[in-house]
């Protein structure tokens, strides 16, 4: 959850407040960080969030399959009653 908030905040902040392109002649600082630092934080937290999401799905894969099968099984049983 925290990583999602970091990715979302940095993404929205860069999209709305940091101009696109390369600054000419100097580094521009936004809320105390350069554009490169904002991009680094955004990219690293997005990669870590993706890895943790994959791990979460792997650890809960049996539950996901069981829940999906039961959901569709109940739907087909309801259709048979009518």
Image (spheres, grey):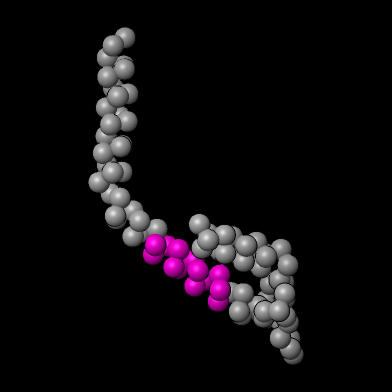
Q: Nearer the viewer, residue 42 or 26?
A: 42
Q: In the figure, residue 31 lies in which quadrant?
A: bottom right
Q: Up-down: is 55 above or below 60? A: below
Magenta: main secondary structure equals: helix
Q: Up-down: is 53 above or below 35? A: above
Q: Up-down: is 81 above or below 25? A: above
- What residue is at 67 percent from the left and 79 percent from the top? 33
Q: Which quadrant of the figure contains the C terminus?
A: top left
Q: Residue 51: x, y in percent?
A: 39, 64
Q: Residue 69: x, y in percent?
A: 26, 34
| Residue furthest bottom as drawn | 25
| Residue furthest top as drawn | 82
Q: Residue 60: x, y in percent?
A: 30, 50
| Residue furthest front as drawn | 2
Residue 41 within the magenta-colored segment of the rendering: yes
Q: In the figure, residue 14 lies in which quadrant?
A: bottom right
- What residue is at 74 percent from the left and 90 percent from the top? 25
- What residue is at 28 percent from the left and 49 percent from the top? 61
Residue 47 within the magenta-colored segment of the rendering: yes
Stretch of the chain drawn in magenta: 40-52
Q: Residue 70: x, y in percent?
A: 28, 31
Q: Is residue 14 left or right of residue 3?
A: right
**Tally of numbered discs:** 0
């Amino acid at each position: 959850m925290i990583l999602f908030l970091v990715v979302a905040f940095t993404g929205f902040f860069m999209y709305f407040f940091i101009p696109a392109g390369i600054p000419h002649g100097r580094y521009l600082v936004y809320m105390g960080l350069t554009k490169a630092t904002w991009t680094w934080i955004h990219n690293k937290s997005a990669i870590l969030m993706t890895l943790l999401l994959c791990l979460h799905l792997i650890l809960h894969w049996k539950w996901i399959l069981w829940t999906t099968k039961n959901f569709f099984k109940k739907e087909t049983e309801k259709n048979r009653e009518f």
